[in-house]
């Protein structure tokens, strides 16, 4: 099985920065993509950023230019560098790992989440 552990969340003032980390552990496997989702109070969980095994990155419009997703393949760790944070970025951030072998056979893992609070 796969376990995902997020870290790096916390309280930051508007305009500040945080870097989240997600370490994947378990058996060796091929990863299709890893990403970050977030869920704010009263809102549905939404995709923030993803990075594929080929290195392609995608971001939600709300974070483009402010957030950067990266990975360390040797450590099976994905990072989310968050700059110029805004109060609306406040949410629980969840790490996601996808190794679905095909579109109709999902194999997806989730971390427990880390709280990011942006407040002055």
Image: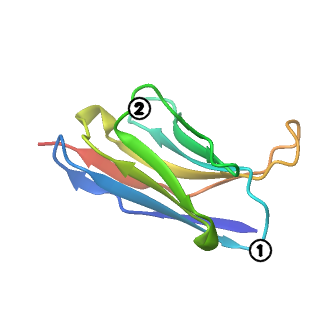
Q: Position of residue 10 (x, y in %)?
A: 28, 57
Query: How has the structure been colored for display?
Result: rainbow
The residue labelled by disc 1 is 27
Residue 112 lies, in percent from the top left, at 53, 58
Residue, x 79% and y 66% (percent of image)?
A: 29
Of the 4 image quadrants, the one containing the C terminus is top left
| In the image, residue 40 above or below residue 3 | above
Q: Position of residue 36 (x, y in %)?
A: 52, 46
Q: Within the image, what quadrant is residue 57 found in?
A: top right
Check disc 2 and report the residue beneath it.
64
Residue ranking furthest to the left: 120
Would you say 14 lies left or right of 7 here? left
Where residue 40 appears, x then y in whole percent?
A: 40, 36
- Seen at 30% across and 54% down, the residue is 18
Q: What secondary structure is found at the residue carrying circle 2?
A: loop
- 74 vs 16: above or below: below
Mark 2–mark 1 distance (CA, rounded to whole Å): 33 Å
Residue at 36% x, 52% y: name it: 115
Q: Specify whether 23 is left or right of 38.
A: right
Q: Report crowding for label 1: few under 14, some 14 to 19, many 20 or more residues within 10 A (C-alpha).
A: few
Is the residue marked by circle 2 packed among few (<14), some (14-19), or many (20+) residues within 10 Å? few
Q: Quadrant of the N terminus?
A: bottom right
Front one among 62 and 71: 71
**Quadrant assignment, res 109:** bottom right
């Amino acid at each position: 099985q796969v376990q995902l552990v997020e870290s790096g969340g916390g309280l930051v003032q508007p305009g500040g920065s945080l870097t989240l980390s997600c370490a994947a552990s378990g058996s060796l496997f091929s990863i299709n993509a890893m990403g970050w989702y977030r869920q704010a109070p009263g809102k549905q969980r939404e995709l923030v950023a993803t990075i594929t095994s080929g290195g392609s990155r995608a971001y939600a419009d709300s974070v483009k230019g402010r957030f950067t997703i990266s990975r360390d393949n040797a450590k099976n760790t994905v990072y989310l560098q968050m700059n110029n944070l805004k109060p609306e970025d406040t949410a629980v951030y969840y790490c996601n790992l996808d190794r679905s072998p095909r579109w109709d056979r999902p194999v997806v893992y989730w971390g427990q989440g880390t709280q990011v609070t942006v407040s002055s």
